[in-house]
Amino acid sequence: MGRALKIFHVNMHHHWGGQPNRILTESLGLRELGHEPWVAGPRGCLLVERARAAGLKTFDDLELRRGFRPASALRDLRALTALFRRERFDIIHPHGSQDAWLSLLAARRLSPRPPLVRTRHNTFPIAGHALNRWHYRQFDWVITISPQVNPLVEAVGFPAEKITAVYSAPDPTRFYPREGNPRLRAELGIPAGAPVVGMVGRLAPEKGHGLILRAFARVRGRFPEARLVLVGKGRSQAAIEALARELGIREQVILTGFRTDVPDIVALFDVFALTPISGESLGTSILEAFCMEKPAVATEVGGTGESVRNGETGFLIPEGPEEEKIAGIADALTRLLGDAELRRRMGVAGRQLVERQFTPRRLAEQCAQIYAWLAQTALENPPVGL
């Protein structure tokens, strides 16, 4: 390894999800490699709380409020500028929208300016207006979490040779094969012996809960005791509950809300489902399920095909009309719920895939290589600020 680097990560989200999970996983890996990662976010955010609990250096004197909030933005800009001048980071790496803009503007007030890296975490198109094009041009490198995201960054004029896809990774110390806890099963209201289909993720329209609900309703005829467990919270909860009632499956659908014991809940699943309709880069929750040897049923959106190998680690439902997707999901669930050996075989294959391609060490090493190259280049030809 080259010299130890001081790396600043910042993320605007208060809640937990794939994005903060990746930042924490990478930061812990960077520390193991001998670097000094910092993790920053708005006051009270779960990412900073968990990073601090893990012994990482943190900073949360920020608001990072959404929308046009000039007074709040100016306050955050001053806080970041003061921090950057004091700590002299080798790399500044924002991950969201507000945090990227403010980190960029604060870094431009330094001379020499440290290299700037940004990660694009989803497959939503980037608005191609002049301001966004200018914004992306200020970064020295962009990391994506799946090759499918790269063209979206190129579309706003960022050079392809400065974009690298680095896959996310689950935490194998939390997600590993285990027997489901009967007490937790009873707590959630799952009858003993009932088949369980589960999904973990934010309750939001792009996550496609309507697809899994409609598919599950079709499966009930063959598996009347089956339960669908939806882990997470979000603005779509009322709509999900209403649709479940309309489909006549409200009693079989269990919404857990936000949970800190996600691995224990996934241990209860027979089949893991992820049915997004847009915005999914990779599907880190699928990788976590694979660590626990759970087969997956997923719609082919963004990078889900990178982890769900159709017929090997689960079933991948191709893009198409909604009715065809629902039928495909229902058929895949029926096959898996009715065949314990198929579930076992696909679960083992999923775990082997993660162990080959999606490890925290690999995530940290690939990012560290990018940082090291940028830091060395900055020493030889320092970027200027404003």
Image (cartoon, rainbow, N blue to C red):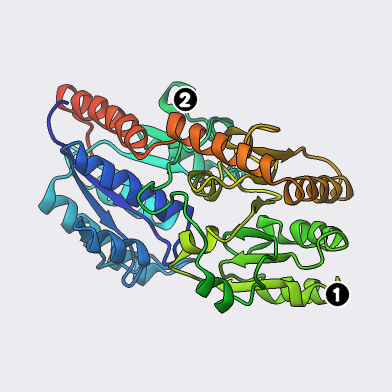
What residue is drawn where x is 73% and y is 46%? 336
- State whether residue 109 is above or below residue 379: below
Q: Residues within 10 Å of mark 1 (few under 14, many from 20)?
A: few
- In the rendered structure, the answer to whether residue 340 lies left or right of residue 289 reads right
What residue is drawn where x is 75% and y is 57%? 212
- Regarding residue 386, the answer to whether it shows in the image is no
Residue kind at label 1, given as amino acid type: Glu
Q: Position of residue 351 (x, y in %)?
A: 50, 38
- State whether residue 219 is above or below residue 243: above
Front residue (pair 332, 99): 332
Q: Position of residue 244 (x, y in %)?
A: 78, 72
Q: Give the labeled residue for mark 2.
A: 159
- Regarding residue 347, the answer to whether it shows in the image is yes
Q: Give the labeled residue for mark 1.
A: 246
Front residue (pair 70, 288): 288
Residue kind at label 2, given as amino acid type: Pro
SS label for mark 2: loop
Q: Quadrant for the C terminus, please.
A: top left
Front residue (pair 106, 330): 330
- Please tell me which of labels 1 and 2 falls first in the chain: 2
Q: Residues within 10 Å of mark 2 (few under 14, many from 20)?
A: some
